[in-house]
C-alpha cells in the first residue's frame, strides 16, 4: 500500500513541476491551448518519467507536508520557467520598440492571444516568428529534457532550494533588455536618420509640413529595415532559445 501511495504522490509531484514549466512554453501550454490538452500532455510526460525519476518518499507524511512538497514543485517550475519567459519577453520588448520606432503605435488593435502578447501586426509577426524558430530548432523538446534532468539533481518532493541562483535570475532578467535593444537597434537608427533628415528639410523649407511628409516615409523605411534584418532577428532569437535549457538548470542548480 505504501508503495502504491508513493507512486501516486510521486506522479502528482512530477506532474506539478512539469505542468508549471509547460505554462511558459507557448506551443505546449500557452493560453491558446485548451486546458484539457495542457493537463493531458503534462500527465503523459509525468507517466513516462515516473519509472526513471527519483522522488522523496511521502506515503507516511501528513497532508501539510505533501501540500508543502507540491508548493516546492511549483516554485521549481516557476523558476525554470523564467528562462523561457525571458526570451518571450525580449521578443515582446523588441517588437514594442520596433512598432514605436516604425510609427505604427496607433495601429495596435489586434495581437496574439498566446503568451500575453498584444499590439499590432509587427508584435504578432515577431511573436509567431519566434515560435516557429523555436519549433524548427527543437527547443520545445530540449525544454522537456531539461525538466527531466532537473529531477536527477532535485528529486520531486526533496524541498531543497539551496541551489537556486539569484545571480542567474538577474542575468536572465537583464538579457530581456539587452536582446530587446539589440533586435530593435537597426530600427532606432533608421528612425533617427529619418528624423534628422526631415528636421534639416524643415530648416531649409520652413513652410513645408515635414511631419505629415515624414510619417509615411518613416513607416516605409521601417518596413524596409524589417525585411532587410529578418536574418539578424532570427539569429538573436535562435541564440537565446538555444540557451534556454541550460539556463533552466542553472537557475535551480546554480551551475
Image (cartoon, rainbow, N blue to C red):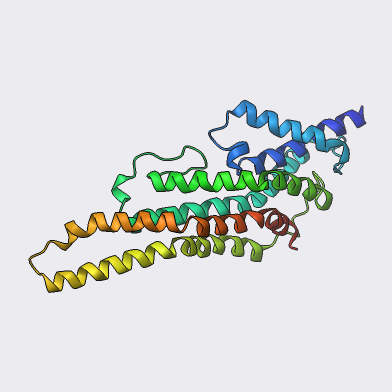
Q: Position of residue 186 (x, y in %)?
A: 42, 64
Total residue callouts = 0
- The residue sitting at 52% across, 46% down in the picture is 129
Residue 138 located left or right of residue 3 = left
- The residue sitting at 69% across, 62% down in the picture is 165
Residue 127 in sight in this render: yes
Residue 33 lies, with reference to residue 196, above or below; the image says above
Residue 103 lies, with reference to residue 206, above or below; the image says above
- The residue sitting at 57% across, 38% down in the picture is 30
Residue in the foreground of this view, choosing between 140 and 86: 140
- The residue sitting at 63% across, 37% down in the picture is 28
Residue 97 in sight in this render: no
Q: Position of residue 182 (x, y in %)?
A: 49, 64
Image quadrant in which the N terminus is located:
top right
Residue 126 located left or right of residue 110 = right
Residue 42 located left or right of residue 30 = right
Image quadrant in which the C terminus is located:
bottom right
Residue in the foreground of this view, choosing between 41 and 163: 41
Q: Position of residue 252 (x, y in %)?
A: 72, 56
Residue in the foreground of this view, choosing between 79 and 157: 79
Q: Position of residue 122 (x, y in %)?
A: 41, 48
Amino acid at each position: 500500500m505504501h508503495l502504491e501511495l508513493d507512486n501516486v504522490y510521486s506522479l502528482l509531484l512530477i506532474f506539478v513541476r512539469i505542468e508549471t514549466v509547460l505554462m511558459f512554453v507557448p506551443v505546449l501550454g500557452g493560453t491558446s491551448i485548451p486546458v484539457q490538452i495542457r493537463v493531458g500532455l503534462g500527465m503523459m510526460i509525468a507517466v513516462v518519467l515516473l519509472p526513471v525519476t527519483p522522488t522523496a518518499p511521502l506515503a507516511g507524511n501528513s497532508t501539510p507536508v505533501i501540500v508543502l512538497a507540491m508548493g516546492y514543485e511549483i516554485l521549481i517550475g516557476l523558476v525554470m520557467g523564467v528562462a523561457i519567459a525571458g526570451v518571450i519577453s525580449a521578443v515582446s520588448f523588441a517588437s514594442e520598440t520596433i512598432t514605436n520606432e516604425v510609427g505604427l503605435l496607433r495601429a495596435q488593435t489586434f495581437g496574439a492571444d498566446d503568451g500575453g502578447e498584444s499590439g499590432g501586426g509587427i508584435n504578432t509577426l515577431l511573436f509567431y516568428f519566434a515560435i516557429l524558430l523555436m519549433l524548427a530548432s527543437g527547443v520545445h523538446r530540449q525544454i522537456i529534457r531539461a525538466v527531466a534532468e532537473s529531477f536527477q539533481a532535485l528529486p520531486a518532493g526533496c524541498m531543497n532550494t539551496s541551489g537556486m541562483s539569484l545571480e542567474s535570475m538577474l542575468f536572465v532578467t537583464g538579457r530581456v533588455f539587452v536582446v530587446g535593444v539589440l533586435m530593435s537597434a537597426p530600427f532606432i537608427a533608421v528612425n533617427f536618420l529619418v528624423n534628422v533628415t526631415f528636421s534639416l528639410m524643415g530648416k531649409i523649407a520652413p513652410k513645408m509640413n515635414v511631419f505629415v511628409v515624414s510619417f509615411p516615409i518613416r513607416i516605409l523605411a521601417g518596413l524596409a529595415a524589417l525585411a532587410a534584418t529578418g536574418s539578424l532577428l532570427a539569429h538573436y532569437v535562435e541564440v537565446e532559445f538555444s540557451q534556454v535549457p541550460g539556463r533552466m538548470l542553472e537557475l535551480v542548480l546554480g551551475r
